[in-house]
Structure formats: C-alpha cells, structure tokens
Amino acid sequence: MKNANGKVYLIGAGPGDVDLLTLKAVRVLGLADVVLLDDLVSRDILQFAKPAARVIEVGKRGGCKSTPQAFIEKLMLRYAQRGATVARVKGGDPFVFGRGGEEMHTLQRAGIEVEIINGITSGIAAPAALGIPVTHRDCSRGVTFITGHTRDGAPPNWRALAESGTTLVIYMGMTNLGSIVDSLSAAGMASDMPAAVIQNAMNRNQNSVITTLKKLPDAVKHAGLGSPSIVVIGEVVNLANVMQQAQIVVAA
C-alpha cells in the first residue's frame, strides 16, 4: 500500500541575505504546500514560494516570546500526515544549533520522510561579513562552534576552550556575554585577545564591534548590540581591518 504521507524539508535559509539561499532551497520552496517560517528568516524568501502555499510564522528568537518547539513539530506532523509537502525554514543551517536533529527524529519516528537542505551557518557568514576568516594558517589552526545557552545550563570546559588555540565562535551568547568573558579570562585567555560581535549579519541593519576580550561587554553595551548576534574570539579578528583595507567584498 502506498504511503499517503507527504514529505518535510528542513531548509537552512542562511544568515539573512536571500541571495545566499541554495538553488535547491529555492526549488523546494516552489514545491511546498506549507511553509513554516522561523522569525530569523527574511520574508524576502517568500518570493520563491508558490502563490497557493500556506505560510505559517513560527517565531523563535532568543529573549523573546517564541512558538513552543513541540507545537512546531505538531504542525509538521499534521500537514505531512495529510499528504502535504512541508518546508520548515530556519535561519542559518538546520543542523548547527537549529534543533534540526530533534525535528528529524520526531518525523522519522512518525514514519514521515524528511530531507535536509543545508544553509550557510551564521557562525561562518557573520565573521565573513567583516572580512574575518574563522581559520587562517598564520594564526588559527581550527574553529570551535559553541552555544552560550544550553538546555541544562551546564557550562562548557572553558579552560579547554581557552587553551585550544582555535577561533571561538559563540552562538546565542549575548545574554551571558559577561559571564562568558569572565570564564574565559579566569581560564587563562589573554585579556587583549581580539574579539568581535556581529548582529544581524548579512542584513541591511547589520551592526558590529571589534575590540578585545576584556573590553567586549562594555563595547557591546555602548554599541547597543543585542540578539541575534555572533561572538567571535581569536587572533583572526585582527585580520578584519587588513581585509577591509584590501577592499575585499564579501557577499555584498
């Protein structure tokens, strides 16, 4: 007997600039009967949805009232079980701090076909917006992506991170930024380690600061930065001005 269920696509919309959507994401949006749209996703992407598609906004933004995750998963199941093609669209990449893994397993347990369409994660795109590479042969042998907000509140191993020699890229770190800076400093990271925060990367209202670890909380406060932002800590931040002076254009 043929499975009457539809299919769900977990789509990464990238950091905000609609031109950074993948070709596959654009194609699937044109096929979707239902589009579940995260709050951080630019509404400009709806130009690629078919006119008859049902668009449901499922806002999820740190520090604000959000649509419960359980309700979002119920919506995906409800429409897929009715035979619909569902596009669940998230900012960045669904598998990088996007709860895509949880959603995939929920759908698979219910017998719903699911496909992942990756997007450019903001942890790479946001630094690039300032001309900051997350790795560089001269000053960074790797990059570590971490979250500043965990479900159980357990802190990472700050000493291991401070001693890793890698660029630290922190998602959802603005609420606990002061604590993060204090923890890295206590773990031995130099107070003059270059650091940056980029808010609304690749969007028209992008804003940022470049400073040092010690001065980061005050610089962010002075600039009025909030969420959504990416925090970048490491020697690669020093390359921002070099690359900007060389007039390197990144996804203009």
Image: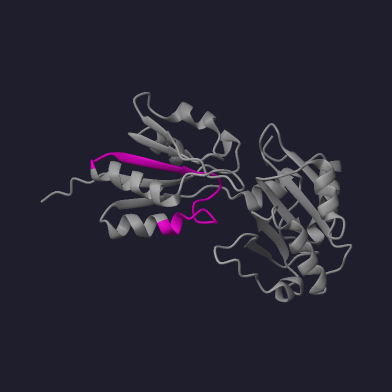
| Residue reaching furthest to the left | 1
Q: Is residue 224 left or right of residue 106?
A: right
Residue 196's x, y, as percent? Answer: 78, 52
Residue 227's x, y, as percent? Answer: 67, 45
Residue 170's x, y, as percent? Answer: 68, 58
| Residue reaching furthest to the top | 51
Q: Which quadrant would residue 154 be assigned to in this image?
A: bottom right
Q: Is residue 175 left or right of residue 20?
A: right
Give the answer, above or below, for where 247 lies relative to 181.
Answer: above
Q: Which quadrant would residue 205 be assigned to in this image?
A: top right
Q: Magenta region: which residues?
A: 82-102
Q: Residue at x 34, y 25 (%)?
A: 52
Q: Is residue 6 left or right of residue 144?
A: left
The way the protein has been coloured in the rendering is one colour
Residue 85 on the magenta segment = yes
Can residue 92 be seen here?
Answer: yes
Q: Nearer the viewer, residue 27 or 99?
A: 99
Q: Residue at x 71, y 41 (%)?
A: 250
Can residue 32 be seen here?
Answer: no
Residue 18 on the magenta segment = no
| Residue reaching furthest to the right | 192
Q: Nearer the viewer, residue 229 or 118?
A: 229
In the rendered view of the protein, which quadrant contains the C terminus?
top right
Q: Residue at x 40, y 46 (%)?
A: 72
Residue 50's x, y, as percent? Answer: 38, 27
Q: Residue at x 71, y 44 (%)?
A: 226
Q: Number of marks in the image?
A: 0
